Image: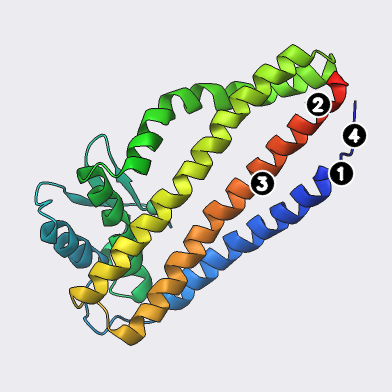
């Protein structure tokens, strides 16, 4: 069994990027929590107006505990905002609030990548849990068919992460456009909004990069074993 694969070097770098991205998203969020939006709108008010502007009057907004726990729940059609985002009127708060509404609008418009993501979810939920065990067992017992099944299972999870990327970027773009056009933020404030949203997007990119490199590594091991 191979203890150190040449790909591990790249994976290690990607892991470093991922950890840096996590720190950066928290740092950027905290920095722009100190900057108040000149419109004075809270995250709740911005989200409510963005939902209403898109005819989503029936989608409620609820405060939830925890930091950066904000999300859109497509099953119950609810936008959930962490308490600081819900109640505060900082650049960070309204950026995150509008990003989550971006997902609600994607859902309403059946944005293809979101639809694909929802369709993949039950399958990925099943395969991603089993993949590591299959891969480890395949490597340990030098059983290439088992390794292949593990790789296929893991591929589904990687594909899911890749599909997540356009979904996240698109939600942020929708948020930024509407925030400017509806006057939630000024043109100068948009730079801060972009920083907050880009920092969050980078964490998804880093996570996808790690998975992609790991998948490549297992494919290389599989190809080697076959030779
Ligand atoms: Zn998102």
> Which of the two marks, 2 or 1, is nearer to us in this view?
2
> Is tag 1's residue or tag 3's residue first in the polypeptide sequence?
1
Callouts 3 and 2 close, C-beta under 8 Å:
no
Mark 2 or mark 1: name the one nearer the start of the chain. 1
Q: Residue at x 76, y 17 (%)?
A: 137
> Disc 3 to disc 4, how far (Cα)?
18 Å
Left or right: 48 as drawn, with respect to 86: left
The residue identified by callout 2 is 223
Disc 3 designates what residue? 210
Q: Residue at x 74, y 30 (%)?
A: 219
The residue tagged 4 is 3
Q: Residues within 10 Å of mark 2 (few under 14, many from 20)?
A: few
Q: Earlier in the sequence, mark 3 or mark 4?
A: 4
Residue hosting label 1 = 6
- Between circles 1 and 4, the one closer to the viewer is 1
- Residue 114 lies left or right of residue 23; in this view the side is left
């Amino acid at each position: 069994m191979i203890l150190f694969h040449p790909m591990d070097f790249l994976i290690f770098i990607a892991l470093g990027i991922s950890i840096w991205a996590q720190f950066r998203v928290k740092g950027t969020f905290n920095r722009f929590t100190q900057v108040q939006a000149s419109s004075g709108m809270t995250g709740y008010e911005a989200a409510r107006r963005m939902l209403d502007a898109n005819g989503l009057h029936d989608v409620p907004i609820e405060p939830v505990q925890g930091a950066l726990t904000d999300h859109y729940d497509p099953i119950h059609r609810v936008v959930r905002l962490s308490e600081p985002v819900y109640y505060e009127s900082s650049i960070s708060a309204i950026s995150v609030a509008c990003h989550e509404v971006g997902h609600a609008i994607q859902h309403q418009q059946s944005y293809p990548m979101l639809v694909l993501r929802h369709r993949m979810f039950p399958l990925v939920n099943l395969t991603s849990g089993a993949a590591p065990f299959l891969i480890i067992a395949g490597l340990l017992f030098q059983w290439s068919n088992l390794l292949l099944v593990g790789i296929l299972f893991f591929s589904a999870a990687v594909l899911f992460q890749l599909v997540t990327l356009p979904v996240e970027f698109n939600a942020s773009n929708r948020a930024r456009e509407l925030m400017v056009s509806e006057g939630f933020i000024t043109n100068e404030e948009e730079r801060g909004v972009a920083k907050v949203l880009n920092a969050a997007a980078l964490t998804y990119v880093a996570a996808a990069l790690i998975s992609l490199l790991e998948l490549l590594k297992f494919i290389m091991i599989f190809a080697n074993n076959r030779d």
